[in-house]
Amino acid sequence: MDLLLAIVAGFVIAQLATLATTVYLHRGLAHRAVTVHPAVAVVLRLFLWISTGMKAREWAAVHRKHHAASDTPADPHSPLVLGFWRVQLANAALYRRTARDGETVTKYARDLPPDRLDRLLLDHAFLGLGVGITISCLIFGWQTGLLVAAVHMVTYLMMSGAINAVGHTHGRRPHENKATNGRILALFTLGEGLHNNHHHAPTSARFSERFGEVDFGWWTVRALAALRLAKIRQRSSDAISVAG
């Protein structure tokens, strides 16, 4: 078993899953800031299925609720309400609880009904994760493959948790909202750490505003747009928009 290979591969897969999350689930579905080409959407949906098992409409619904009730008792994952460590370590469980409460998806994802691909494959989370782990084992061998999957899972979950936990407690607040900007966090989360900027203008596809703010997700969106594989709805953070 190659430990270094497993760590590097797991981290790379986690970064790719984070990229798919920020471009497709977050900027695309949740806020409609960008629309990707249908072929790109299928690739991203399938990759998210085997790497995270997440249902796209559930993710979008929970995130829209977060914006609608940010840092109030109704917020699904506010560290100011629930505590820093609960959000950092149990972010996935908080998402799952809200997504399955029987109300959030119905209210916040009316525009995202399940399609044939969802019903056939993507709504079956454990099947997707099983496929992803099997592919990892076939590529790296079963021992290293399982470790790759574990490193990926832990890295992705901890980065996702940090976006909500760190991103509402530590960092700069250039705009009048309770989210924060963390430039180091933004480096590891491909722009998601610029959370204060995002809450200021949630329908902007660009989270970076100032020199030194790195938003790799935005660079990816721009590259897709240049290749005519995406259409950008709004790229400026000058206008404040309300999600939901």
Image (tube, rainbow, N blue to C red):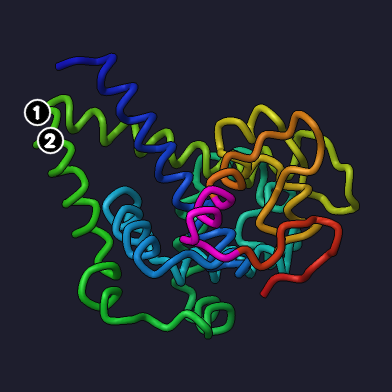
184 horizontally vs 221: left or right: right
Mark 1 and mark 2 residues within 8 Å of each other at the beta carbon: yes
Look at label 1 and name its amino acid.
Gly
Residue located beneath label 1 in the image: 141
Residue drawn at (35%, 37%) of the image: 13
Residue 187 image position (x, y, % from top left) = 60, 31
Q: Which quadrant does the C terminus fall into?
A: bottom right
Residue 183 image position (x, y, % from top left) = 71, 31
Residue located beneath label 2 in the image: 137
The quadrant in which residue 33 appears is: bottom right
Q: Nearer the viewer, residue 244 or 207?
A: 207
User: Could you give the CA–CA distance between mark 1 and mark 2, rounded to whole angstroms?
Assistant: 5 Å
Residue 123: mark: none
Q: Which of 244 and 42 is in front in this view?
A: 42
Residue extent of the magenta highlight: 221-231
Q: Is mark 1 on a helix, strand or loop?
A: loop
Residue drawn at (70%, 48%) of the image: 207
Residue 126 image position (x, y, % from top left) = 23, 58
Look at label 2 and name its amino acid.
Cys
